[in-house]
Structures are given as structure tokens and as C-alpha cells.
Amino acid sequence: MADNSVSPFKLTRPTYSEAEIAETPWIIIELRIYDALALAVEYPAVSDSSIASAAQDLNLLFPPNRPENLSTSSGLEDPASFLWEFWDVIAKVVLELPYNHPSQEQLIRLIETLRDLPDPVEIELNLWGTYKIWTDLPIMGPVFREALDRTDSEVINVNLEAFLARATRAGISNFSWLGLLSLHWALEVEPDHRAKAYGEQGPILDAQIPRALRWLEIAGKKLYEEVLVEQFKDAGYAAGGTWKASRGFSKARWEYWKLRFGQVAVHTQPSEPTKELSRKALHRMVEIETLHGH
């Protein structure tokens, strides 16, 4: 049942002229992808059956699965080319989905449903290897990495990061390194106390603490699992700053983050809402530890 307190969401589809469609037959497939996505993400019209139907519709658009009546005048695309374009459409849609709206969870459910369809097709992707469609969700990760690199709006980044946190939590694609970076930038990047910038940290903390908290709220359990196995300890993610020990996730670093959230909560420079969010983040970290029996 839809929550009446949540704003409706309607997907914005691109529009093309007849001349553009005639010149670029792929547009027909692109619009069918949008039609299928609308079944899954528009709120409150979505249902379990509409998500299942959307997954089937998308599956039939994949070139090896596509029936003749859905083909375009240019014939079938190369599977790798289709997947790049397909995930790019998904990434564009994600930018529209508010970070705290049910439509984000609905899109996650759609991708899970697509991934779990029976009788996956095995294909060879040049330079990438052999994958199963849709079990392996190939090329999703690289496309979303590109989406991160090309976004420049803070609002868009919030929507995109929230979705990637949900994808990480669901095991669809692992962007936990981005969660690591969010905690690093919020809690470990601090000017020298002798520098003028040290007295001007308030706006930075006001921007970064909410970002770190979102990761803990959405995918905190997954991040803690990475902590327990010391994920990325040999990688270069989130190096430098006030944290001088091992790189990547670690229990010691987790404890340091708890300490820093506690410090920010009583710091003189952040706004009162940011201090409250810091207390909330610390509480969430303790809650996650309890859920793991620690």
C-alpha cells in the first residue's frame, strides 16, 4: 500500500522528433526501456506484478532475447553495445530519483528481479570475458563509475550515491569504496590546526557529515562486513588525512570514526543539525555492531 505522505513520482522520458527516430533506430529501444522502467519506479502506481512485468519487458529487449516484432530497421545491436546504452539509461533515471524516495528501492527491486530471471543467456563480451545475462549484471559497475565522474550537481550526487549505497547493500554492485571515501572526507580530512582554514570547517562538516550518515543508514551493515575482513587494505582508497594507520576498512578505523563523530557532535563550528546528525551516526555505528553481536 502506498504511503500517502510520500510525494508521487513520475518518470521523465526523453522526447524525439520523427526525423531523429528515423535517423537513429536505437531510440525506439531506448524509449521501450523507459516504458519498462516507468512500470517499476513510478509512485504510487508500482506493484509487485508491475516490477515483474518490467523485468520481463527489459529481458526481451536484450538482443539475443529480442523477438522479431520488437526489432528495429537497423537490426540487432552488439550485446556489449546494448548493455552500455542500457545501463546508461538506468544511470540517467537514477539521477531523477530523490535519494529518500521509495522509487529508489523500487529500482533496486527491479534490478534484483532482472538478475534472478531463470534461464540466463551466456554471452562473450569483447575485452570483458564471458557473462550470464542477467545474473552477472555485466557493465553495470563501469557505467555507474562513469556516471559518478561526470556529475557536477550536489543534488544529483546525493541521489546517485544513495542509489549506489542501496545497490551495495543489496549485493547488486559493490560500491563500498565510495562509502569509505564518504567517511574519510567527513571525518579524516582536517586542516592543520595552525592554518586559517582550521577555523572555517563548519560548512565542510555541514556538507560531508550528512553524506557519511546516509551511507551508514543505507549500507552500514555491508560497510561493517567490509571492516571485519579489512577490505581494500592493499588499495589506495581514502589514504592520507588524520588517519595514519592501515588503508581501507579496519576495526581500528571504525573505532576512530566513532571517536570523530563524537568529537564533531560537540565541535563549535558545525551547525546544530550537523551535530545532531553526528550523534545519530555514532548511534547507528553502535547499532550495527550490536546487530553483528559485537
Image (cartoon, rainbow, N blue to C red):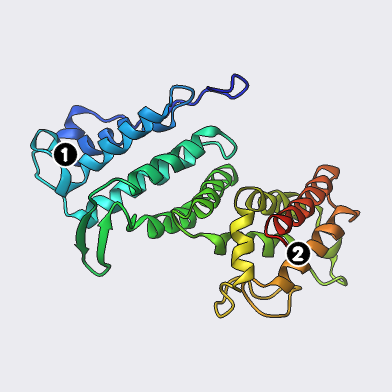
Q: Earlier in the sequence, mark 2 or mark 1?
A: 1
Amino acid carrying label 2: it is: Trp
From this viewpoint, is residue 177 visible? yes
Say left or right for 289 vs 201: left
Q: Nearer the viewer, mark 2 or mark 1?
A: 2
Query: How many labels sit on residues?
Result: 2
Dot 1, how many residues are within 10 Å of its Cα: few (below 14), some (14-19), or many (20+)? some
Q: Which residue is mark 2?
A: 257
Residue at point 64%, 59% (across, down): 182
Amino acid carrying label 1: it is: Pro
Q: Is residue 34 above or below residue 171?
A: above
Dot 2, how many residues are within 10 Å of its Cα: few (below 14), some (14-19), or many (20+)? many
Q: Is residue 210 above or below residue 31?
A: below
Judged from the image, the secondary structure of the residue bearing numbered disc 2 is: helix
Q: Is residue 272 above or below residue 80?
A: above
Residue placed most toward the observer, 50 or 30? 50
**Residue 230's x, y, as percent?**
61, 74
Q: Which residue is mark 1?
A: 25
